[in-house]
Image (cartoon, rainbow, N blue to C red):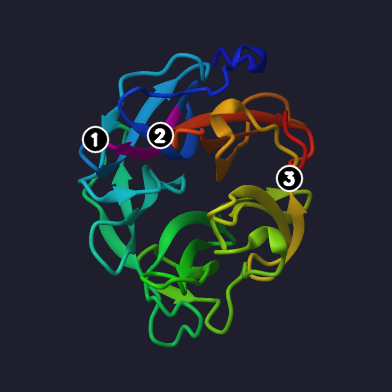
Amino acid sequence: MEFHYDRIQRPAWKLNDADLRDPAVFLHDDLAYVFFTYYDFKNVTWHVGMATTEDFVDFSEIRLISPEGYASPGNVIQVGNEFVLCYQQYRNFPHTICLSRSRDLYHWSEPEVVFNTGSDNRWNIDRRVIDPYLVAWDKKYYCFYTGSTRWGRPAGYNLIGVACSDDLRNWNDLTLDKPAIGVDFDWEEPDGNENNCVIRKNGKWFMLYSASLANQRIACAVSDDLIHWQKGGLCDIPVMDASVGHFGAPFIIEGLSGADTWHMICQGKDADERMSLFLFESRDLIHWR
């Protein structure tokens, strides 16, 4: 890849005829595969889109890889000789988590619904799940998800849970009694948290997530076991004209440059409520430039 952070624009990518949201990136064979929600605001349609880039300055033509009504790609993991992408079904209620599979990162299978919480979950009272993120660890798969207590109600929260699987098809909800990420601080008000990503750092798990929906910013948390999390507060991220409305949906990109440097792609909303994608750099995952 020909990546040079000092060449990155702010925003890194913005379209005239659609909004880009919920980014995810997979690095493979000197290319960055960028996945995102493609929202056509004129026709009010949602798709999972993808493009490739060598430098995050120029992007290939966008391909829509899901049916209409699917959104919020979480991440791609490699399982054997295929790639697995998670995202949400948002067309019909209840919303559910889906997987698609590919051998080449370009051609993706039809979405396969794999998870929603059951009646034994005591906090996801809306019985819907969105915003998945997959972690492969110790011969198991973990799927973070967002449930809620606010759908169709004047008030309530989005909350983050986690499930576990041996095969990516049969899932055990590990957060039946309470969410992994609930609402504990003023900066998570008035409507909760969503859109998390997780990486391994210095023997611990590190999470970034969207804190608050109405006043969306990006917060962090740390865990030893992927289930119990210690929140670290809001991250230090510069606010641009194109993100003055709010910013969130963080995704940490590992491997773009040195081992002691991380990059984050996220969404931002401007004063006209248009959405675009931003790229930031950090040495500690807290302070971003």
Relative to 85, is 143 on the left or the right? right
Near-viewer residue (104 or 287): 287
Which disc, if any, is residue 235? 3
Mark closest to the chain's N terminus, 2 or 1: 2
Distance from disc 2 to disc 1, alpha carbons, whole Å, reads: 14 Å
Relative to 6, is 177 on the left or the right? left
User: Do we see residue 254 in this rendering?
Assistant: yes
**Span shown in magenta:** 33-41
Q: Nearer the viewer, mark 2 or mark 1?
A: 1
* 162 is higher (above) or lower (below) than 67: below
Distance from disc 3 to disc 2, alpha carbons, whole Å, reads: 22 Å
Quadrant of the rendering where the C terminus is positioned: top right
Dividing the picture into quadrants, the one containing residue 130 is: bottom left
What residue is shown with label 1? Answer: 42
Mark closest to the chain's N terminus, 3 or 2: 2
Find numbered disc 2 in the image and state the secondary structure of the residue it sits on: strand
Give, as a three-letter code, the residue at label 2: Leu
Dividing the picture into quadrants, the one containing residue 236 is: top right
Near-viewer residue (185 or 21): 185
What residue is shown with label 2? Answer: 20
Near-viewer residue (130 or 199): 130
Which residue appears at 43% of the width and 30% of the height? 33
Give, as a three-letter code, the residue at label 3: Cys
* 130 is higher (above) or lower (below) than 4: below
